[in-house]
Image (cartoon, helix red, strand yellow):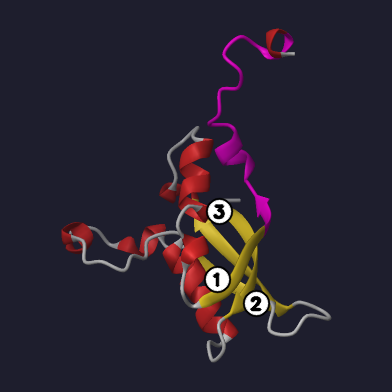
Amino acid sequence: DTDILAAFRVTPQPGVPPEEAGAAVAAESSTGTWTTVWTDGLTSLDRYKGRCYNIEPVAGEENQYICYVAYPLDLFEEGSVTNMFTSIVGNVFGFKALRALRLEDLRIPIAYIKTFQGPPHGIQVER
């Protein structure tokens, strides 16, 4: 696997379709921004974009959806939990198109997990 997969529970604002909310979460938590950045013209962002690949209604809940987003590993710094979580959940929770948002699940591929070196003194010392 080459992507980090996230499942968000999304409650869009009234009038915002779930597809738009899912796409907004994917964009805002990867390469999207509300401001003009001068470097945008230098690099194609397609390689780094988060993509909302599925949306399912939450059973028994009105206007709530699970949005599944795939993030390419190239988006993240190797061996950095801080970078990964800052990218995925750092800014997206204040997004105005959403009434509520919660990260429900995160799946990290083995290829990315292997970039972490583990505790500096070994597991026996850390215990």
Please rate how many residues cluster around mark 3, counting C-alpha atoms within 10 Å: few if below 14, some from 14 to 19, many from 20.
some
Q: Which residues are magenta?
A: 104-124
- Residue that mark 1 sits on: 52
Residue type, label 1 = Cys
- The answer to which of marks 3 and 1 sits earlier in the sequence is 3
Q: Are marks 3 and 2 in contact (CB under 8 Å)?
A: no
Location of residue 116 with respect to 2 vertically, above or below: above
Please tell me the numbered disc located at residue 55.
2
Which residue does the image show at 83% across and 81% down from the upper left? 60
Please tell me the numbered disc located at residue 3.
3
Q: Are marks 1 and 2 in contact (CB under 8 Å)?
A: yes
The C terminus: image quadrant: top right
Residue 71 horizontal side relative to residue 103, left or right: left
Please tell me the numbered disc located at residue 116.
none
Task: Check disc 3 and report its element: helix, strand or loop.
Answer: strand
Which residue does the image show at 73% across and 9% down from the upper left? 124
